[in-house]
Image: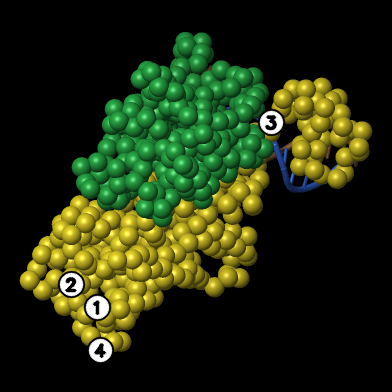
Chain colours: A green, B yellow, C blue, D brown
Amino acid sequence: MRDVAARAEVSAMTVSRVLKDDLRVSGATRERVLRAVEELGYRRNETARRLRVGGSGMIGLVVTNLANPFYSRLALGVQEVAYEQGLRVLLCNTGEQVDRERGLVEDLAASQVDGMIVVPAGGSHRHLASDVLRGMPVVLASRPPAGMEADCVLVDDFGGAEAVTRSLIEDGHRRIGFLGNPPALYTGAERFRGYWAAHEEAGLEPDEHHVRRGLPDVAAAERAAAALLERPDPPTALFCTNNRLTQGAIRATRALGAPAALAGFDDFDLADVLGLPLTLASYDADEIGRRAGRLLIERMTAAPGSLPLARRSVVPTELIRYGTDRP
Amino acid sequence: MRDVAARAEVSAMTVSRVLKDDLRVSGATRERVLRAVEELGYRRNETARRLRVGGSGMIGLVVTNLANPFYSRLALGVQEVAYEQGLRVLLCNTGEQVDRERGLVEDLAASQVDGMIVVPAGGSHRHLASDVLRGMPVVLASRPPAGMEADCVLVDDFGGAEAVTRSLIEDGHRRIGFLGNPPALYTGAERFRGYWAAHEEAGLEPDEHHVRRGLPDVAAAERAAAALLERPDPPTALFCTNNRLTQGAIRATRALGAPAALAGFDDFDLADVLGLPLTLASYDADEIGRRAGRLLIERMTAAPGSLPLARRSVVPTELIRYGTDRP
DNA sequence: CTGTTAGCGCCTTCAA
DNA sequence: TTGAAGGCGCTAACAG
């Protein structure tokens, strides 16, 4: 900046003013400065600027697994609103490891991010509490805060699961299997609640023998689905709590030639092309990111105390039916 | 830091030394400092540190479309090696817009990133040239440099397309349709070359009437595939240059009940379950990110001039066949 | 409209 | 082993 100033024959302060579009600079001076900037290929040092003005112009985004399209879409949504606001995004991946999450959050705080959006991996969110982070704004995505207060954006897990299950019941299914991820996960628990509630509403009760929870991956889901379908009293439909489990179930029904109807959470590519009766609770993953971004930015710009403590935004699900009109 | 120093009754300099694991601090002093750090919940200000020591401990990652699993996997790979090295990743999405890319790259440079990995959107890469970026290390991913020199990591687009096409020819196909993305894209051009070369090797020549290039999305691919399949001399197989085009082709064959064999680039979930004859050139998208990360880090740490100017790393493809043993 | 002074929080250098 | 001085590049506050 000193070099630019020298070349334009002004003070560094004037260069600084031109670069921030300060109006109190004469047109001629501005021109000279801009020319010097151009000629020297000068670029303002953002690190130094930030040290002076505070903050960093960055927000942190911590997700559990970027390989899951759900989280990459979420990241895209965050990206969008951040870009509109001229904020940069520091992206971190925890691989569902709590200690790694803790370290990354710590790093982000040290990097002076202006706020962060976290998909929390583990049970305790103590390291995200406002006193630990010195009041740095935090928004949780996809899982609610535990043992602390924070804004969060959730999917309507309960409602979606309920709607899907109800739809199966309305189709006449009375034995509906359940393939679920670990119940320790919020989404797992909520979706199970929805499944159960839909049964209760219809005066039914699920058969515990048809319930398999704690399935970690596609292969486990496939095995569990196969085991259910090979029972003497097999379920006539399977409800799967996420896209990977649905895929496992699809494999199992295909392999066994079993006629079970499938239902699940999360839409996926080519679902329409499978030619299977498939009912899905779908939702807009980008929207979770966008909402989280907006909540965070509000929190960052609002006067402390002017916003409710822990706001909660719930993204609705939509019922999608595929292949039910095909043989 | 001053507060910590006061509490530990040492100078700020000593605190700084403890925090950087400088050995020349007595055990007792170190203990006292660490205790003070703990009690005050002190966290070193990375912005200030970086102003002093230079650099930023961050690398920039610019992708064209994070919603495409290919790029989110690439991002994951970059993330991995960055994390190992204690580097943070600033993630940007261009949506294939060249001017946006230009702006983001400029921002990253201003943010003092230590280097960047870019999936370039457009034709000219002038804004990524080393003189524009003042020698900041740049690695290109998935598309080669144009009009400049830089390290890059590519997929074996030619070889993959050639292998897939050859496999179709060996299956006896003589009329193989081609559904391609815009030829202006490097991958599009290379994959077309591979398709053509496999024909030449076999003493064949593709029928230009069976070639459709410049397809932007799934819907266009579906229409193009349908048009080809409804010709009086329809192709007996279709080669699609990416996963979205393959999906369009699948839709078309399903809708028409056409028996065409399909082949494509990029593996995808549930490909095995479709029950269609499907041959794919698959590759490890994470690996592209990891390699790009490693090349970048080498470039960042190597003495200028000690490394070859423009290194090129090519990720191999693997031939995968699905459903060919099914009716 | 433009410049001077001072300091953001840290670390390199030099001195004790 | 510890501390004091000075400055990284920028900008707020205060002249003029």
Disc number for residue B235: 2
Residue B53: percent from the left, percent from the top? 66, 45
Which is closer to the viewer, label 3 or label 1? 1
The residue at the point 34 percent across, 41 percent down is A261
Disc number for residue B43: 3
Amino acid type at mark 3: Arg
The residue at the point 69 percent across, 31 percent down is B43
Amino acid type at mark 2: Pro
Answer yes or no: are tags 3 and 4 on the same subunit.
Answer: yes
Asked if the residues shown at circle 1 and circle 4 are in contact, with their CB atoms under 8 angstroms apart, the answer is no
Distance (Cα) linking label 3 and label 4 = 69 Å
List the residue tagged with mark 1.
B173
Distance (Cα) linking label 1 and label 4 = 13 Å
Amino acid type at mark 4: Gly
Mark 2 belongs to which subunit? B
A326 is higher (above) or lower (below) than B11: below
